[in-house]
């Protein structure tokens, strides 16, 4: 596909490729893992990702914010050994520094899982790590430094795999660093393709945050947060500024995936953040948590077949602003982990009836907690501590760690902790699971790969 190809033709090509690779991904999942319970991959990954991990994960990749005077002081990708059979279990085995600080935040695999893309919310640089050649020691192989000038956006946040592409959701823009933003589309080899603006009409407020796709429904959901001028301020100072607190997103957008155009805009007050589609067969809904109002929101079709978003439950005591941040849905769509930053709690909700979630468990997992990742079978839960450099707590409450918990269906039991300050690494933020070797596809899956590739190439 040439860059000079008209936009409409490129979109049709991408749409056809998306549909084919969606089918291929499902075939690969079946070929690589059989029943979903034997897979170890996180449930938040793109549905277009192949090479799912079978069984026990070997590594945990942690995108880490540098702290001046601590170690080399730079942002880095840290690798932890998380296989209980290893002599290095629960230990740091590698770190790849990027040579600067830029507010390291989120990461995402490419569709072939060979590379991990990572971004900085302050300097808007993007880093591409090779996680295939030596999975225990990822290597920085590409730096994209012109994201702001090419895309007109700043704060690359969500890295979401499409077939041969990376869709990047940003938090702000390069013009005034406010909340109006968009998404940037790149090829897997790092070429900028186009910018897709967040809607500012028909109820759209222009804000962005997370991306989540349901290919079977031709549906892409995005959520909303705030711009650079807010997220780079001290949290205490920001919360005292009434005008600034009005500059947070209050919408979610349902997109037509094929055309990449907004189809519906939902009012979801209070900065809805992470989005998780239920992966259970037959389910047709997604869930999110709004940070400022501490509320769970369900996106589901109403009886007439129209998508709608509605508040379905509170997280803790909203009056105390527990600040829900990351969420992780179980593979069967029946449960949801929710981390709340301010009170350091990890809560579990029963989603058997997604329209009436019920909290069934809660544990204080740290003075401040942010990201939460679980294995596909739900028996292993990882928690990290940092939110943003200027939002993290001060003094003794500024713990920086990754903890691994075992979940037996009744209790979270801490099995180990890596103190990122003690190890002179920095502030631990986003996490992704890794494997020592890429799983081999079955003959059936390999044949499906060749057929899909030939079909896409023919068009």
Image (cartoon, rainbow, N blue to C red):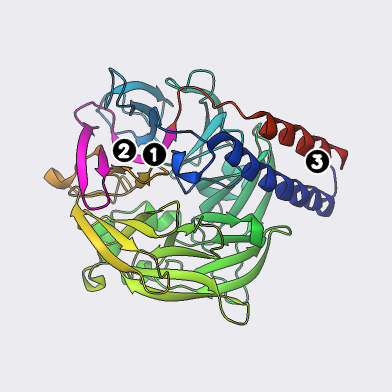
Q: Is residue 372 left or right of residue 194?
A: left
Identify the residue position indicated by label 3 in the image.
456
- Looking at the image, the residue that sits furthest to the right is 458
Q: Secondary structure at mark 3?
A: helix
Prevailing secondary structure class for the magenta stretch in the rendered image: strand
Q: Position of residue 85 (x, y in %)?
A: 31, 22
Few, some or many C-alpha atoms within 10 Å of disc 3 (few <14, some 14-19, many ≥20)? Answer: some
Identify the residue position indicated by label 1 in the image.
431
Gap between marks 1 and 3, in whole Å? 33 Å
Pair 2/3: label in front: 3
Q: Secondary structure at mark 2?
A: strand
**Residue shown at 28% from the left, 17% from the top:** 87
Pair 1/2: label in front: 1
- Going from the N terminus, do you reach mark 1 or mark 3 first? 1
Location of the N terminus by quadrant is top right
Indicate whether residue 405 is drawn in magenta.
yes
Indicate whether residue 71 is drawn in magenta.
no
Identify the residue position indicated by label 2 in the image.
428
Q: Is residue 110 left or right of residue 393?
A: right
Tell me the magenta residue range: 404-433
Q: Position of residue 453 (x, y in %)?
A: 77, 35
Up-down relation of residue 41 to residue 440 (above or below) = below
The quarter of the picture where residue 262 lies is bottom right
**Residue shown at 22% from the left, 70% from the top:** 317
Q: Depth check: 246 or 210 in front? A: 210
Do tag 1 and tag 2 residues touch (Cβ < 8 Å)?
yes
Gap between marks 1 and 2, in whole Å? 8 Å
> Does the image show residue 77?
no
Location of the C terminus by quadrant is top right
């Amino acid at each position: 596909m040439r860059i000079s190809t008209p936009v409409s033709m490129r979109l049709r090509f991408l749409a056809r490729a998306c549909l084919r690779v969606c089918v291929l991904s499902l075939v690969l999942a079946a070929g690589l893992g059989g029943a979903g319970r034997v897979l170890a991959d996180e449930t938040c990954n793109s549905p277009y990702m192949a090479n799912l991990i079978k069984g026990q994960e070997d590594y945990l990749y942690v995108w880490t914010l540098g702290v001046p005077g601590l170690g080399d002081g730079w942002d880095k990708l840290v690798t932890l050994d998380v296989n209980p059979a290893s002599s290095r279990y629960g230990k740091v085995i590698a770190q790849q520094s990027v040579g600067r600080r830029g507010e390291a935040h989120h990461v995402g695999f490419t569709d072939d899982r060979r590379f991990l893309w990572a971004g900085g919310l302050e300097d808007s640089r993007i880093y591409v790590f090779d996680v295939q050649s030596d999975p225990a020691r990822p290597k920085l192989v590409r730096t994209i430094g012109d994201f702001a000038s090419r895309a007109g956006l700043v704060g690359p946040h969500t890295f979401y795999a499409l077939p041969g592409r990376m869709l990047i959701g940003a938090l702000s823009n390069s013009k005034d660093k406010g909340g109006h933003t968009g998404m940037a589309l790149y090829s897997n080899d790092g070429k900028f393709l186009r910018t897709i603006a967040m809607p500012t009409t028909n109820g759209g407020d222009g804000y962005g945050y997370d991306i989540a796709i349901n290919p079977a429904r031709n549906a892409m959901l995005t959520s909303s947060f705030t711009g650079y001028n807010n997220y780079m301020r001290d949290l205490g100072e920001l919360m005292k500024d009434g005008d600034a607190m009005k500059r947070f997103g209050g919408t979610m957008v349902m997109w037509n995936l094929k055309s990449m155009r907004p189809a519906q805009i939902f009012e979801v007050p209070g900065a809805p953040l992470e989005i998780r589609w239920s992966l259970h067969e037959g389910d047709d809904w997604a869930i999110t948590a709004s940070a400022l109002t501490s509320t769970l929101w369900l996106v589901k079709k109403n009886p007439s077949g129209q998508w709608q978003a509605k508040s379905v439950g509170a997280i803790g005591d909203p009056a105390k602003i527990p600040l829900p941040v990351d969420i992780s849905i179980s593979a069967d769509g029946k449960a949801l982990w929710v981390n709340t930053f301010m009170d350091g709690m990890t809560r579990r909700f029963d989603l058997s009836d997604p329209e009436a979630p019920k909290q069934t468990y809660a544990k204080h997992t740290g003075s401040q907690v942010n990201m939460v990742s679980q294995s596909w079978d739900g028996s292993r839960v990882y928690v990290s501590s940092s939110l943003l450099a200027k939002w993290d707590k001060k003094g003794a409450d500024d713990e920086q760690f990754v903890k691994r918990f075992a979940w037996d269906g009744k209790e979270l039991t801490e099995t180990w902790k890596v103190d990122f300050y003690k190890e002179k690494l920095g502030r631990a933020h986003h996490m992704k699971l890794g494997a020592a070797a890429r799983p081999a596809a079955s003959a059936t899956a390999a044949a499906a790969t060749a057929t899909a590739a030939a079909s896409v190439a023919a068009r």
